[in-house]
Image: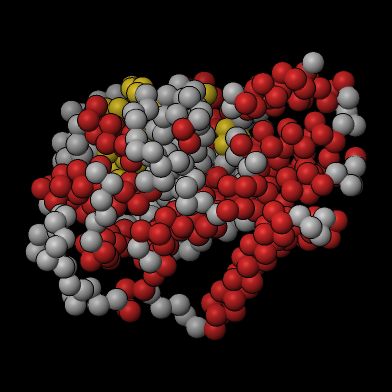
Amino acid sequence: EGAAQCDVCFSDKDYENAIKYYSEALEVNPSNAIYYSNRSLAYLRTECYGYALADATKALEIDKNYIKGYYRRATSNMALGKFKAALKDYETVVRVRPNDKDAKMKYQECNKIVKQKAFERAIASDEIKKSVVDSLDIESMTIEDDYEGPKLEDGKVTLRFMKEMMDWFKDQKKLHRKCAYQILVQVKDVLSKLPSLVEITLKETEKITICGDTHGQYYDLLNIFKLNGLPSETNPYLFNGDFVDRGSFSLEVILTLFGFKLLYPDHFYLLRGNHETDNMNQMYGFEGEVKAKYTAQMFQLFSEVFQWLPLAQCINSKVLVMHGGLFSEDGVTLDDLRKIDRNRQPPDSGPMCDLLWSDPQPQNGRSVSKRGVSCQFGPDVTERFLEQNKLDFVVRSHEVKAEGYEVTHSGKCITVFSAPNYCDQMGNKGAYIHLRGSDLKPEFHQFTAVPHPNVKPMAYANTLMQMGMM
């Protein structure tokens, strides 16, 4: 009976309940490989890749001939960027089912990635990597006479340009590559001069709007600006990472955000999320989208720019904002954050990794992350960190919340998520936060998803993620 309920949850995309039912079914019948495999899929759908991996492995311990288990485990490893481990499982499937076309294709796709990674490592150690900027001659790029879209004015972003660009994107039109390159080169220059921990002061009368993940949901981003006003020197914003991937309008989102960063460098702030990274972009669509709309070279430049995004922001020395959360060990100070050398892909552990990946948990202490990266931290961890650094609370994003936000750890840890009806299927609200200089008391504003053109989320994602989710 439980399993039937689970299947209903799956077709309704209610993964949280599916997980609950399968967990109950497993308590009654702990040696059912199928339940583990199905719960693994539910965990994949909710981005709990660490748990998904554990469940798939468990299914295979119970029944090593259960082919679906190998698929699930491979998908979990792919999601974690562990391509070699995934390849091993695809190999097993192909060996057992030599005539399975789908398995063969997944094996080849994964093999291609493993080879490409090895090749990239080989050339990376060879020479100091040159910037794409050095091989671009933007000056000599011509804008054709029949291009009717927005252009920078004397090479500069203006408010008029921003409004025109947003309308142009809204009509699903493409910005001229010269303009896109101009924005990227300029924003790289601006970001590279910033510290890893940005510190700002809000005066008594000032307020800032903090937004969470936007994930390529361009039409919802426009809605935020409609509801809350366009960014300006008197209407500052902080976007807390995960601008790209999953949603299929990631280019439009990121170019809009970068444009505003250039227009109002001291009143518009961007922090890096775990999706402003090569591994994620390769799996979840941004790399595919940039290659489809422009070129591989432009993706390389995006990758360089993402490495310069700051990792955290402190407001009035009282509120710390980061994408993921707190740290795998006690004793990390704001000064440690200032010292992070961030111009790189994030490492597998340490403060930079934690800032992008960790999540809060209700119980004290720390535990292994459901995501398979970083950790989960309890209220006591938050309390000690805030005390040591003389802070009031932290604001983070990184997790879908039904209401668009969530207040945990006795008000000391706040989550904000700004992609409503995430992936066109989660049914969640989006939210943003107002913080005022006078009292720094968070004020929440919720909003719901707006219609967008008929392009599915994950349209540009790696085929292994699209099919691996089946």
The x, y position of residue 392, in whole percent, is 42, 30
The structure residue drawn at horizontal position 29% and vertical position 76%, both measured from the top left corner, is: 136
* Depicted 43 relative to depicted 108: above or below: above
Residue occupying the point 45% across, 77% down: 129
Badge count: 0
In the rendered view, does 96 fall on the left or right side of 416? Answer: right
Residue 381 position (above or below residue 458): above
Give 294 or 286, whichever is nearer the viewer. Answer: 294
| Quarter that holds the N terminus | top right
In this view, which residue lies farthest toward the top?
Answer: 1
What residue do we see at 83% from left, 40% from top? 59
On the picture, is 50 further left or further right than 203? right
Q: Residue 89: where, in percent of width, then height?
A: 78, 56
Q: Position of residue 167 (x, y in %)?
A: 19, 43
- Asked which quadrant contains residue 405, the reply is top left
Residue 389 visible, this angle: no
Residue 371 found in image quarter: top right
Q: How far from the left and from the top, in percent, is residue 70?
A: 78, 49
Q: Is residue 3 visible?
A: yes
What kind of colouring is applied to the model shown?
secondary structure
> Can you say whether 29 is above or below 46 in the image?
above
Q: Quadrant of the C terminus?
A: top right
* Viewer-nearest residue: 397 or 119: 119
Give 251 or 433, whichever is nearer the viewer.
251
Q: Residue at x 77, y 22 (%)?
A: 3
